């Protein structure tokens, strides 16, 4: 049974809700870093598949060395088997749809603040485009990198469970090394962009906040205030980089949220309309119909039928 709304959970909350914490034992604080061998998943998970949809306050990724699993990120479904790696930035809607009993590999969940603190860097994930919400979620590691990936993650697991006095520093540096090691294999090379100055940086910051921490109550002026610029300046930058206005970007994100709530929950249409900031169900229905051609209730029926 799908739940009324999609909860936002920290890592400890996720473990408390879906598994037995002792199966994920680590001497590092669960809310900061967790690495789980997927072989433990069947004995630890307490929910049948598909599991309820959640948002995590942490980043996570899953690397498959054997078996298979299906996982949703937002409205997209990904079938993962040997060699696949799936990235889930913080606050993205995630749902495990299925998992084979012979699954093997690793699940890693971490707080970006933990990395920043240990590395003394403000944006430790900035070099890795695969952590951006707009980037492709799933990649396939080349066969020649499979063993390297598995060994690196196994070493992280062992350190996280050890009593080494510097285990947190070691784990963080190993994690960053892991990202740098896989980067050439999964991150497309990019050509220098003459627009990548303050205009593009502001537009990207707006897009990141919008996709990762969407608040339907926020207006263009609210986002502009967040970045200490005028609404007009923010709008010009966003239009120049993305070819659409801030309001259009907000509407697109609101539509995505509506689709996820309709698909992933059993919340009433009125509750969804209220959560997304619509004055009433009529306004929500008109908005959704203009964007998709469906009434919200018809869209939910089509999704349920397809599944």
Image (cartoon, rainbow, N blue to C red):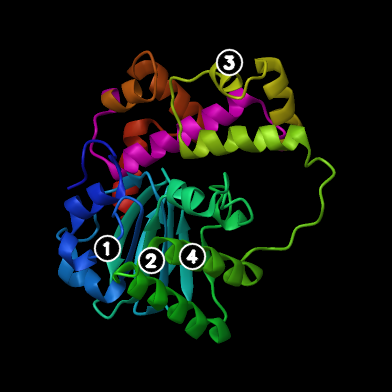
User: Residue lying furthest right in this view?
Assistant: 194
Q: Are marks 1 and 2 in contact (CB under 8 Å)?
A: yes
Residue at numbered disc 1:
27
Please state if 208 lies on the left or on the right of 204 as rendered: left
Question: In the image, what residue occupies the spot 51% across and 82% down?
Answer: 148
Q: Along the polypeptide, which appears first: circle 2 or circle 4? A: 2
Residue nearer the viewer, 13 or 257: 13
Q: CA distance from mark 4 to mark 3?
A: 38 Å
Residue that numbered label 4 is attached to: 175
In this view, 228 is above or below 120:
above
Q: Nearer the viewer, residue 254 or 131?
A: 131
Quarter the C terminus occupies: bottom left
Q: Residue at x 61, y 57 (%)?
A: 128
Query: Which numbered disc covers residue 221?
Result: 3
Q: Residue furthest top?
A: 279
Q: Which residue is mark 2?
A: 167
**Numbered badge on residue 112:** none
Work out how far the residue at label 3 is from the one at label 1, CA to CA, in angstroms.
44 Å
Label 3 neighbourhood size at 10 Å, few (<14), some (14-19), many (20+)? some
**Badge nearest the viewer, 3 or 1:** 1
Check whether the beta carbons of the residues at disc 4 and disc 1 lie within 8 A of each other: no
Question: Do the CB atoms of the residues marked 4 and 3 lie less than 8 Å apart?
Answer: no
Is there CB contact under 8 Å for labels 2 and 4? no
Q: Which tag, 3 or 1, sits closer to the chain's start?
A: 1
């Amino acid at each position: 049974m799908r739940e009324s709304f999609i909860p936002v959970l920290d890592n400890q909350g996720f473990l408390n809700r879906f598994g037995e914490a002792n199966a994920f034992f680590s001497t590092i604080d669960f809310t900061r870093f967790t690495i789980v061998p997927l072989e433990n998943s069947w004995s630890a998970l307490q929910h049948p598949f598909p599991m309820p949809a959640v948002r995590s306050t942490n980043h996570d990724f899953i690397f498959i060395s054997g078996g298979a699993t299906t996982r949703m990120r937002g409205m997209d479904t990904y079938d993962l088997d040997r060699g696949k790696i799936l990235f889930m930035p913080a606050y993205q809607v995630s749902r495990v749809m299925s998992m084979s009993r012979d699954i093997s590999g690793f699940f890693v969940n971490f707080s970006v603040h933990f990395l920043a603190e240990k590395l003394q860097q403000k944006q430790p994930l900035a070099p890795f485009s695969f952590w951006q919400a707009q980037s492709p979620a799933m990649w396939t590691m080349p066969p020649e990198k499979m063993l390297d990936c598995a060994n690196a993650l196994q070493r992280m697991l062992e350190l996280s469970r050890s009593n080494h006095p510097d285990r947190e520093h070691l784990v963080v540096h190993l994690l960053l090394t892991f990202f740098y090691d896989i980067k050439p294999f999964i991150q497309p090379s990019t050509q220098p962009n003459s627009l990548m100055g303050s205009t593009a940086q502001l537009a990207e910051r707006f897009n990141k906040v919008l996709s990762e921490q969407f608040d339907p109550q926020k207006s263009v002026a609210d986002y502009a205030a967040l970045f200490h610029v005028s609404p007009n300046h923010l709008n010009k930058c966003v239009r120049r980089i993305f070819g659409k206005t801030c309001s259009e970007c907000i509407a697109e994100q609101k539509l995505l949220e509506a689709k996820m709530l309709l698909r992933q929950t059993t919340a009433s249409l009125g509750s969804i309309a209220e959560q997304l900031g619509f004055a009433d169900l009529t306004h929500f229905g008109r908005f959704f119909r203009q964007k998709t051609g469906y009434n919200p209730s018809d869209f939910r029926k089509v999704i349920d039928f397809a599944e």
